[in-house]
Structures are given as structure tokens and as C-alpha cells.
Image (tube, grey):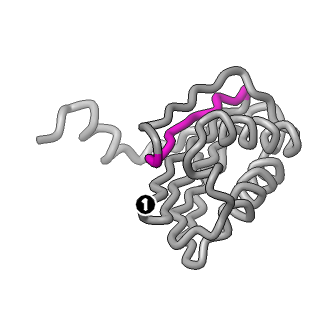
Amino acid sequence: MNTPAISAAVTSTAKITRSATGLHLIGDLYACRCEQHLMLDARALEDFCKRSVADAGLSTVGSLFHSFGEGDGVTGVVVLAESHLSIHTWPEAGYVTLDVYVCNYSTNNRPKAEKLFDTILAAFNPADPHLHRVERA
């Protein structure tokens, strides 16, 4: 059931100028061949992600990582001044989901987002990566 606001948004043909475009990089990483601590250790994964954010030239404003227990996966997010990085691990399946999203309000952050995404992708070394690139406008 569509609400009037959603219906109007879907059917609107008005041209809107947007000044805050963005890039959303999404990865479903299957058959990861990585150091196990990245899959299992919330502190190690958080430290790695925050170092990777800084190395890419992006700005961390906060983070939260949670371990689901001994031998279980980790879920985490790094909130960026430019937007966010989120990551979720399933060590029992060798599977990781990864999202890097940046806004481009005052500067083009696409190269920084790509560097961050590529760094994390390389660390997890998936045999079967399913990658998506969404230009947000």
C-alpha cells in the first residue's frame, strides 16, 4: 500500500538539483581467505577498519563493534564525517558483508571511498566477491 507521499515521490517528474551526491560501495564477500582475527575479534576488526579509514583520508567520528561470542562473527560500523562503513562477518561460512558510503557535499570523496573499500576487500581476500557500485544522487 502506497502512502500519498511515497506515491507522489515515485510519480514526480520535477527536476531537483542535488548538491550532495554520493557513492555507495557494497560487497558480499564469499569464501574469504583472511587472517581469522578479522572474522572473530571485534577489537582487531575495529582497529583495522579505523586505520583503513584514516589511511584512505576519511574522518572517523565514532565506531561500534560487537562480537557475538567465542568463535562467532562480528558486526560493526564506523561513522564517518563523510558517511559510514559497515561490516558483518560470518566466520563459519567464510562470508562478509561490506558497505562503504560517502557523501560528496563539499569535496569528491569517491577516490577515498574506493581506496577504503579496496583495502578491506584485499584483507578479506574473497574467492568469490559480489561487488556493487551505486551512485547516489
Depth order, front residue of 16/57: 57
Residue 80 x %, y %: 70, 30
Which of the two residues, 38 or 120, is positioned nearer the viewer here? 38
Dominant secondary-structure state across the stretch colored magenta? strand
- Within 10 Å of disc 1 (Cα), the crowding (few <14, some 14-19, many 20+) is few
Q: Position of residue 31 (x, y in %)?
A: 53, 73
Q: Which residue is mark 1?
A: 92
Q: Residue at x 85, y 45 (%)?
A: 56
Does residue 61 appear left or right of residue 69 in this picture? right
Q: Which residues are magenta?
A: 71-81
Q: Count of labels shown?
A: 1
Magenta residue check for 4: no
Q: Quadrant of residue 54?
A: top right
Residue at the spot 72% in from the left edge and 41% down from the top edge = 49
Instruction: Point out the residue furthest to the left here.
Output: 1
Q: Which residue appears farthest toward the front when viewing the image?
A: 70
Q: Position of residue 130 (x, y in %)?
A: 53, 71
- Please tell me whether residue 72 belongs to the stretch shown in magenta: yes
Q: Residue 133, position in %: x, y?
A: 60, 62
Q: Please state which of residues 23 and 50 is positioned toward the viewer in this rendering.
A: 50
* Residue 64 vertical placement versus 137 (above, below): above
Query: In this image, 127 relative to 28: left or right?
Result: right
Q: Residue furthest top?
A: 61
Task: Identify the secondary structure beneath mark 1.
Answer: loop
Judge left or right: residue 9 versus residue 116: left
| Residue 125 in the image: above or below residue 68 | below
User: Tag 1: residue type?
Assistant: Glu
Specify the quadrant of the image occupied by residue 20.
top right
